[in-house]
Amino acid sequence: MSLIANLLLGGIFHAAVLFLVAAGLQLVFGVQKIVNLACGSFYALGAYFGITLVTLAMNFGLPAWLLLPILLVAGVLMAAVGPPIERLLRTVYDRDESFQLLLTFALVLMFQDVLRLVWGANPQSLNNVHLVYGKLTWGDLSVPVYNLLVIAAAGATAFFISLFLRRTNYGRLLRATAENRAMAEALGVNVRSVYAVVFTLGTMLGTVGGALVVPTSAASLDMAIEFVIEAFAVVVIGGLGSMPGALVGALLVGLIRAASLVVYPEFEILAIYVIVIAVLLFRPSGLLGKAAT
Amino acid sequence: MRLSRRRVLKSLAATGAAAASPGVFMPALAQTGPLKIGILAPRTGIAASAGISGLAATEWAVEKFNAGGGIAGRKIQLVVEEETSPKDTIERFQKLVQQEKVECVMGIVSTGVGLALGPVVEEARALTIYWDGTTQDGVDEKLLNPKYLFRSTDNECEAVMSSLLAIKHWKGQFKRIAGINPDYSYGRNNMAAFIALLKRFDIEHEVVTEQWPKVGTMELTSHVAALKAANPDLIFSSLLFADLPVFMKQAHAADLTKGTKLVFPAAGWQHTLMKKDFTPEGMIFGHNTLYFDNPQATPMQKEFVAWYAEKQKDYPNWEADRAYFAIASYKEAVEKASKAKSGQWPGVDDVIGAMHGLSVESLGGKGGWRKDNIADQTFVQGFSTHNNKYDFVTLDPAKIETMYSADLQKPPGAKFWDWLKTAQFKI
């Protein structure tokens, strides 16, 4: 029993991490129709700055239980890189998708160098400060409460984004812009401002995700690329631009990966991409995405 | 002699070919002025920390050598290029040799890049010394008997040493073994070498799971869960990038490290990230060819470690030693060859000849070059301890083991996997 619980929790934790990266990608694509490869860089930026802020806070003698709010603040602060980058992306909104991909990929490479200049080439890591919240132990099962908090944060993110998009006026405005930009503009919606807000929100999802995950992991120069590839698998499975799709896709990827690691570890990567290919063949719009008309 | 158009063209072609061969013309043209040495090292990406460690050691060595008059009287000038993909690295190598006219190229951390570059080195006839990246598979097939290329010790040395230590100290204390190793030739070979040695010494064992995360995977909770489900007595792991401290942290949080024997031959690549908080005492911990806190350290190692700590705010790993060893042995070889030629600047063949049989005091201990252009170096491993002044684990001074690679790698001409079955190991 504890074996299954261990595997489930491992898979769900991985899914939560993936969802936090993929959510920003989905939001930006859903509204701005830009495949933002740099979402992985925002994740890395949040992770690095999270370590810096936590280290500073601990040096100033703040209690360790403040870890979670400090990391949230780190993620929110780093979202400040969103508006200038959105300003840069305006140059390619009306151009071919390949320009958008090239520009956002260039950003990934540039961010890698910026991270190296600021934090150095060595990976960065915190000590076990996340265990300040304790561990949940039951039989053979032992899981840090912090991991459960990350899972809860991912769930809460999905819930509040959904609430924001469906129940608030600004959310309706975003959905209207996503559906028909020209019509929204004609009706007086300031699309430039909407794009800036959406991109900053997407950036924040990435930076907060990175900051939240780093206490259980580490920050390294190549982490941006590592997660963005898996995040793409998530959005292909769930449906590009669909937030519930991102959640379902992340859960599927996380759980399939966890199961394959026990059943046949050689299939860890293969299992995920077999599903990606199956989705592309039989349901190209993704499990919860809208079919192109 | 009558001059025909064909004869003139032939002469021009021969002159052009000779001019394009750095091995033929370079030493004669470059006897005055600074001695250019090309460096190919990763400064970004997953291996950046290794590249920067190696570069720092090279710069330290150059500073010291130049202060003492350089190499055979010529001051060293470094030309640094990036090691990235095989294709781009080959282009940069060619730039170093053809444009910059360097007399020796050093660097290379990745086995994949090293394999691709090897034939280019031989074709260019440019003396090249690799810091690292000599993994068996591929090397056996693609880099047979090179003349101009000098390669590091076999990458499996550390796995062989850790396996021998596990057998020596823990024989009879484990049966269920598990592995978590990076999914490329290095990780696969190390795990296979461990299992081969268990068989070689008739150690009863059962492989309960083998996990192969791709290199640099930063989220390993599912792997940890799978390992825990397999309930191993011993875990063998050659993780060595940022994934190593991540694994250790997540394994500790899941209580996987409690009561499980751990054999980590390459942990020293990330030693300062292996915090006491989550890295247990008593694990077999490999520092490869440089253990920064070695109680038997030479004054030179102590001086370097102090300089590195001051400059980099960190402690060096083995890539620093590999880089120092490369440039120090080149210096020794050039000076030996120059002496043999009564002070004349030696040709590339003279330097190659002088490399063989050298004995060089490197940062981590003595080293030398075999006739087949493979390095021999000193390896250090031991058992982790929390009893130190740092926030990360070091080696228990009472349990440090030192072995020379002649006892850890296949002899010239032998096949690694066959050699493992018959070698006489000193355990």
Image (tube, coloured by chain):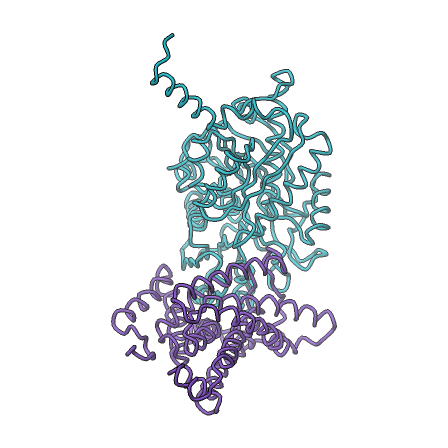
Chain colours: A purple, B cyan
**B296 is higher (above) or lower (below) than A180:** above
Q: Which residue is drawn at 48% across and 55% down?
A: B174
Q: How many marks?
A: 0
| Residue at figure coordinates x 38%, y 63% from the top left | A268
Question: Front-most of B331 and A254?
Answer: B331
Which corner quadrant of the image does residue A291 belong to?
bottom left
Image quadrant occupied by the N terminus of chain B: top left
Place residue B379 in its image quadrant: top right
Q: Which residue lies furthest to the top in this view?
A: B1
B247 sits to left or right of B2: right
From this viewpoint, which residue is outermost toward the left?
A282
Q: Where is residue A180 in the image (x, y as percent from the top left)?
A: 38, 83
Find residue B260 and report its horizontal and vertical position in percent. 52, 60
**Does residue A21 sit above or below B124 in this rendering?**
below
Vertical comparison of A125 with B362: above or below: below
**Front-most of residues A92 and B229:** A92
In percent of the image, x 45 and y 75: which residue is there? A28
Depth check: give the residue in front, A77 or B361: A77
From the top left corner, tell me how far across and down residue B332 is, in percent.
Answer: 62, 28
Q: Is residue B233 visible?
A: yes
From the viewer's perspective, tell me whether residue A32 is left or right of residue A150. Answer: left
Residue A194 position (above or below residue B262):
below
The reply to whether residue A2 is in sight is: no
**Position in image of residue A137 (x %, y %):** 53, 76
